Image (cartoon, rainbow, N blue to C red):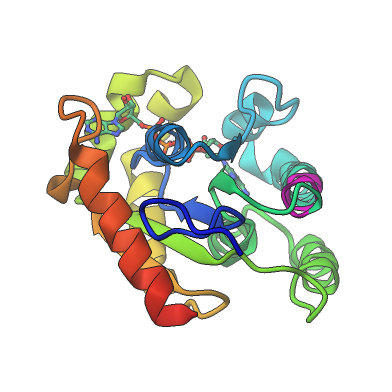
Amino acid sequence: MNINKYGIPENAVITIAGTVGVGKSTMTKSLAEALNFRTSFEKVDTNPYLDKFYADFERWSFHLQIYFLAERFKEQKRMFEYGGGFIQDRSIYEDTGIFAKMHYEKGTMSEVDYHTYKSLFDAMVMTPYFPHPNLLIYLEGSLDDILARIQERGRPMEQQTSIEYWEEMHGRYERWINSFNACPVLRLNINDYDLINNEKGIDLILEKISHTLKQTI
Ligand SMILES: Nc1ncnc2c1ncn2[C@@H]1O[C@H](COP(=O)(O)OP(=O)(O)O)[C@@H](O)[C@H]1O
Ligand SMILES: Nc1ncnc2c1ncn2[C@H]1C[C@H](O)[C@@H](COP(=O)(O)O)O1
């Protein structure tokens, strides 16, 4: 196993988790650049269901979850076929642990659809054959800071969605990460780093990643 100058294995797969707008894509880009890793991004612009979903959760939540599951599973395959060396923008675990569960429990995904989706997810992902990432970096911040970022980024479908939706998701993320155990976790608070105005902001994060990975080997 080759280790780079930061003490991070060159074949590591690191996934970035956290609520919408918290800064996953920004972190994915910065880390991949610093480590010379490949990226795996969520494709928002080409998603055929996302706009429709935000306009009518009940009608489209099952279709969207199936679409995301297929996309992320293909990406997962690609990352491991390359032999690792990837930063991934959002983990596959959030699809079921946050989104599908939330829509089912809030009544915008039917019980039968949720069970169909969940059994497919479990059969594909929650098996000993599924390679888990080496590390999940969890980005956290206050609801107000995250709402400001959603506004600043300016995707109309998200701006038009109620604050209660983001608030519900924010609370669920906190509970979800506290019981997550599929792979090692590094928690980062968005007030403790700045990747936009401070070029050196990434160095501290690389040190933390290296430290966490060493403890898990
Ligand atoms: N460290 C940061 N400091 C300030 N603003 C940030 C930071 N990271 C991301 N942002 C801003 O927050 C918004 C959402 O970031 P993004 O990376 O797209 O989030 P996500 O991928 O989690 O949805 C963007 O407008 C981005 O420029
Ligand atoms: N599994 C999902 N269900 C519903 N919506 C989802 C899911 N995964 C991502 N999304 C949405 C949330 C955002 O509007 C976009 C992109 O996410 P982001 O956190 O901005 O990268 O897709």
The spot of residue 67 in percent (x, y) is 78, 42
What's drawn in magenta, residue-wise? 74-80
- From what the image shows, is residue 180 above or below residue 27? below
State the residue in front, 186 or 64: 186
Q: Quadrant of residue 183?
A: bottom right
Q: Is residue 44 left or right of residue 193?
A: right
Q: Is residue 183 left or right of residue 216?
A: right
Q: Is residue 84 left or right of residue 180?
A: right
The spot of residue 210 in percent (x, y) is 36, 63
Ligand 2 is located in which of the four quadrants? top right
The spot of residue 18 in percent (x, y) is 41, 52
Residue 151 visible from this viewpoint? yes
Predominant SS of the magenta segment: helix
- Residue name at image x 23 percent, y 26 percent: 196
- From what the image shows, is residue 174 above or below residue 144? below
77 part of magenta stretch: yes
